[in-house]
Image: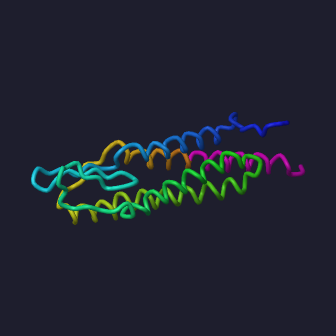
């Protein structure tokens, strides 16, 4: 029985694995903290807006942040699939490009939509936490992986040409 190896010696695979790791970490750290002595204390996670007060002034359901966790989860799954598509570079390139688009939409959702919506509900300005940097780090690693996949494909095409 022969196992299918992961091509870890390719630099784009390393970038994809690092993007996957930072994509997983976004689920464990808060994206933003909303704190005001009168209006309350809230933490925005990918999965929910959690009140740190015993009697919260606003409550949200699990579905309030559903676009965030759906996009983050899809991004992680597509990145994992991309790691194993090292033999089909064109498909890998398309999948990574789509994942970049998903991550850009995640960042836009967090910084524009959710920031404004929660500020409107709580009257508190956000202070961004460590979790907000992980989607940005993921985006950087995906862009680097995309660049090296393109470089690899150009190298293969140049070797296939007749001279």
Left of 64 or right of it: where is 92? right
Q: Can you say which quadrant of the picture contains the N terminus?
A: top right
The residue lying at 50 percent from left, 50 percent from top is: 139
Task: Please identify the residue farthest to the front as the structure is shown.
Answer: 54
- Viewer-proximal residue among 10 and 75: 75
- Residue 146 counted in the magenta span: yes
Residue 71 % position (x, y): 49, 59
Left of 103 or right of it: where is 86? right
Q: With respect to residue 158, does 109 lie above or below? A: below
Q: With respect to residue 30, does 100 lie above or below? A: below
- Viewer-proximal residue among 152 and 46: 46
Task: Please identify the residue farthest to the right as the structure is shown.
Answer: 162
Report the magenta residues as a range: 144-163
Residue 156 % position (x, y): 79, 47
Q: With respect to residue 127, does 6 lie above or below? A: above
Q: Which colour scheme appears in the figure?
A: rainbow
The residue lying at 67 percent from left, 48 percent from top is: 149
- The answer to which image quadrant residue 11 occupies is top right
- Residue 28 counted in the magenta span: no
The residue lying at 39 percent from left, 64 percent from top is: 63
């Amino acid at each position: 029985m022969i196992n299918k190896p992961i091509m870890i010696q390719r630099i784009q695979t390393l970038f994809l694995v690092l993007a996957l790791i930072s994509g997983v970490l976004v689920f464990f750290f808060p994206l933003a903290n909303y704190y005001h002595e009168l209006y309350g204390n809230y933490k925005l996670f990918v999965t929910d807006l959690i009140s740190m007060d015993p009697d919260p002034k606003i409550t949200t359901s699990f579905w309030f942040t559903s676009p965030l966790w759906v996009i983050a989860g899809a991004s992680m799954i597509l990145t994992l699939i991309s790691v194993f598509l090292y033999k089909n570079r064109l498909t890998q390139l398309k999948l990574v490009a789509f994942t970049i688009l998903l991550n850009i939409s995640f960042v836009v959702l967090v910084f524009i939509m959710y920031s404004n919506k929660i500020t409107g509900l709580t009257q508190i300005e956000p202070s961004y936490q460590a979790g907000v940097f992980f989607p940005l780090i993921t985006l950087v690693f995906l862009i680097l992986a995309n660049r090296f996949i393109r470089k690899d494909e150009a190298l293969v095409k140049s070797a296939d040409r007749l001279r």
